[in-house]
Image (cartoon, rainbow, N blue to C red):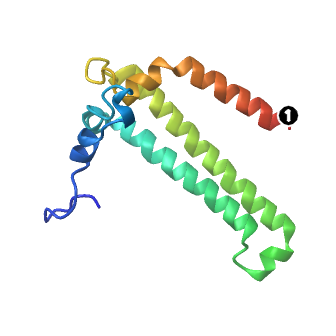
């Protein structure tokens, strides 16, 4: 539970700073991440848009698999149109999330503040991550 205005719960900053990576081999963990998120509106907007995009995609999938009204279960054109509509919206929202994430890395990212934490380690391994995602996308596309 996160800290309320009445002092009940945990501080997100304390949770992130207290996190110790398993075995201690993963650098500084989440230290410095709270200040990075708190000082960058693009990081915050990217996280919010990514969350909203995932939720919108889940809504599309649930509307397709669990129709809310009886007539939608019989009207396949409407069902397919609603699914496609919500997936397009999710795609547009995710594009905004990726754009604001890129703006964050260009304008607001501070390497000294994030030295050896989880964000810096992700950037150090970006080539391997991109290669893996490329191969996974190719596999999913061709199978």
Single out the residue that lies furthest toward the left: 6
Q: Residue at x 26, y 31 (%)?
A: 32
Q: Which residue is mark 1?
A: 142
Q: Please identify the quarter of the rendering in which residue 72 is found.
A: bottom right
Say which residue appears at 69% left-offset and 26% top-offset: 134
Residue at the limit of the structure toward the bottom, as seen here: 70
Figure quadrant of the C terminus: top right
Q: Residues within 10 Å of mark 1 (few under 14, many from 20)?
A: few
Q: Which one is in front, 2 or 89? A: 2
Q: Is residue 126 above or below residue 31?
A: above
Q: Position of residue 97 (x, y in %)?
A: 50, 39
Q: Position of residue 107 (x, y in %)?
A: 36, 22
Q: Quadrant of the N terminus?
A: bottom left
Residue furthest to the front in view is: 23
Using the image, determine if residue 38 lies above or below residue 2.
above
Q: Name the residue rendered at 21%, 51% in the picture.
A: 11
Viewer-proximal residue among 36 and 16 = 16
* 111 relative position to 92: left or right: left
Judged from the image, the secondary structure of the residue bearing numbered disc 1 is helix
- Judge from the rendering whether residue 61 lies leftward or rightward of residue 27; answer left or right: right
Front residue of this view, candidates 53 and 12: 12
User: Quick check: 139 above or below 106?
Assistant: below
Q: Position of residue 69 (x, y in %)?
A: 72, 80
**Residue under the image location 80 percent in, 60 percent down:** 80
Q: Quadrant of residue 132?
A: top right
Above or below, 11 against 16 in this view is: below
In this rendering, position of residue 47 left or right of residue 77:
left
Residue 34 falls in which quadrant of the image? top left
Task: Name the spot of residue 95 as percent of width and height, x first.
Answer: 57, 37
């Amino acid at each position: 539970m996160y800290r309320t205005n009445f002092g009940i719960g945990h501080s997100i900053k304390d949770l992130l700073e207290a996190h110790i990576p398993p075995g201690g081999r993963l650098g500084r963990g989440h230290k410095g991440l709270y200040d990075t998120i708190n000082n960058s509106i693009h990081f915050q907007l990217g996280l919010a848009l990514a969350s909203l995009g995932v939720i919108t995609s889940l809504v599309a999938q649930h509307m397709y698999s669990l129709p809310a009204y009886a007539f939608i279960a019989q009207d396949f054109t409407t069902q397919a149109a609603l699914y496609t509509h919500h997936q397009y919206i999710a795609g547009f929202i995710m594009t905004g999330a990726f754009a604001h994430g890129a703006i964050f890395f260009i304008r607001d990212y501070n390497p000294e503040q994030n030295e050896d934490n989880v964000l810096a380690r992700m950037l150090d391994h970006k080539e391997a991550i991109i290669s893996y995602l490329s191969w996974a996308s190719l596999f999913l596309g061709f199978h």
